[in-house]
């Protein structure tokens, strides 16, 4: 087990090293003045000279890369000259909004999607199965931004026109100030993201359970006299969880790197909104920081998923 974990950690470190190398060469070695790319067109010559000194562009390329990696490992992701703040501080302020959105949405879409998929798989061809498949079809057909705009219109704009407030229009309130206000402001973003993802997870659960419930060991468990509940949960669901965990790890990692559409629709100032602003403003230090952070989330999620494989599947152990 220890060897397996060390191997996965080493592989993750290699992936991050390759990603950081790609980012470094893309922004610092590509044709053009790195100082001008970072500071923008309005920077003075004195500012450009100071940035060149900070970047060490007059030093050998290997030394520049080693400095870049060393700073990144220490949490120094550079300096945003447009915002006049360190990139790490800007990102750290944005992470709570994205983290709150993702955690709440994950809980909701698992609580909705897995039971619906399980219900459809246990009663194939029945009315419950048809209702479950209808939910899947509708959920997968609605783009996230359309569902978000509909939610704002029906649950914010119309009640506002009637003289009362059912849900706020958006924005993020810190959990530490008031947990109820925090949840109230995130209720619509959670629901919007969860409904679209729940449809996908319901379809995935249904397909996996239909495959698993036809296996020989399921028939053997039933022949031994086990109750249907034990057959489904102890034998069927456990085997079906492996692809669900794989997909969940990938989805969480990608969303932590920035749920761009939801954050834009509801005005949540998270990592996704920060990435959009950085691209629009050509703020390359922030773009670099967000890319490296997203890579870290993906590598970490994959390592966690591999550990869950060991716990779920005896064959891997």
Image: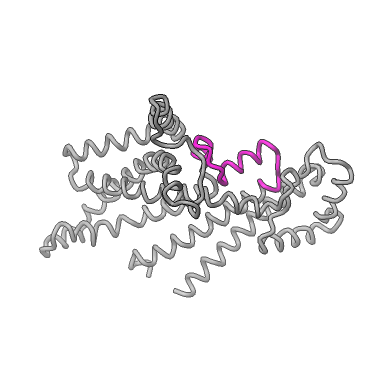
Q: Which residues are magenta?
A: 260-287
Q: Residue furthest front?
A: 163
Main SS class of the magenta portion in the image = helix
Quadrant housing residue 277: top right
Q: Pick the quarter of the image with the C terminus.
A: bottom left
Total marks shown come to: 0
Q: How is the image coloured?
A: one colour
Residue 4, horizontal then vertical, whole percent: 47, 70
Residue 194, horizontal then vertical, whole percent: 39, 43
Q: Residue furthest bottom?
A: 2
Q: Residue furthest top?
A: 161
Is residue 281 shown above or below 206? above
Q: Pick the quarter of the image with the N terminus.
A: bottom left
Residue 251, horizontal then vertical, whole percent: 45, 49
In reply to whether residue 270 is colored magenta, the answer given is yes
Residue pictured at 32% horizontal, 34% vertical? 137
In reply to whether residue 279 is colored magenta, the answer given is yes
Q: Nearer the viewer, residue 177 or 76?
A: 177
Residue pictured at 37% horizontal, 51% vertical? 107
Is residue 49 shown above or below 43? below
Residue 96, horizontal then vertical, whole percent: 53, 52
Residue pictured at 46% horizontal, 51% vertical? 178
Is residue 214 shown above or below 191? below
Q: Nearer the viewer, residue 124 or 148?
A: 148
Q: Nearer the viewer, residue 121 or 286?
A: 286
Name the side, left or right, on which 279 lies relative to 44. Answer: left
């Amino acid at each position: 087990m220890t060897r397996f974990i060390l191997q996965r950690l080493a592989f993750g470190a290699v992936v991050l090293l390759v990603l950081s190398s790609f980012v470094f060469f893309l922004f610092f070695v590509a044709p053009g003045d790195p100082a001008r790319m970072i500071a923008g067109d309005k920077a003075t010559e004195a500012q450009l000279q100071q940035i060149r000194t900070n970047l060490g562009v007059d030093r050998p390329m290997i030394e520049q890369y080693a400095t870049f990696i060393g700073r990144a490992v220490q949490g120094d992701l550079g300096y945003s000259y447009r915002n006049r703040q360190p990139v790490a501080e800007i990102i750290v302020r944005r992470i709570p909004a994205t983290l709150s959105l993702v955690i709440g949405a994950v809980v909701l879409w698992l609580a909705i999607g897995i039971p619906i998929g399980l219900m459809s798989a246990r009663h194939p061809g029945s009315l419950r199965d048809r209702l479950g498949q209808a939910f899947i079809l509708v959920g997968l057909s609605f783009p996230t931004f359309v569902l978000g705009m509909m939610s704002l219109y029906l649950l914010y704009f119309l009640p506002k026109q009637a003289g009362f407030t059912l849900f706020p229009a958006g924005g993020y309130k810190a959990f530490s100030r008031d947990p109820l206000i925090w949840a109230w402001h995130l209720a619509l973003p959670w629901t919007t993201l969860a409904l679209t993802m729940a449809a996908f997870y319901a379809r995935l659960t249904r397909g996996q359970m239909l495959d698993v419930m036809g296996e020989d060991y399921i028939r053997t468990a039933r022949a031994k006299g086990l109750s249907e509940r034990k057959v489904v949960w102890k034998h069927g669901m456990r085997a079906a969880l492996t692809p669900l965990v794989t997909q969940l790890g990938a989805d969480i990692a990608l969303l932590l790197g920035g749920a761009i559409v939801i954050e834009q629709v509801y005005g949540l100032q998270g990592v996704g909104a920060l990435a959009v602003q950085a691209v629009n403003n050509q703020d390359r230090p922030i773009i670099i920081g967000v890319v490296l952070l997203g890579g870290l989330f993906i590598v970490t999620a994959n390592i966690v998923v591999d550990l869950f494989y060991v716990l779920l599947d005896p064959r891997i152990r």
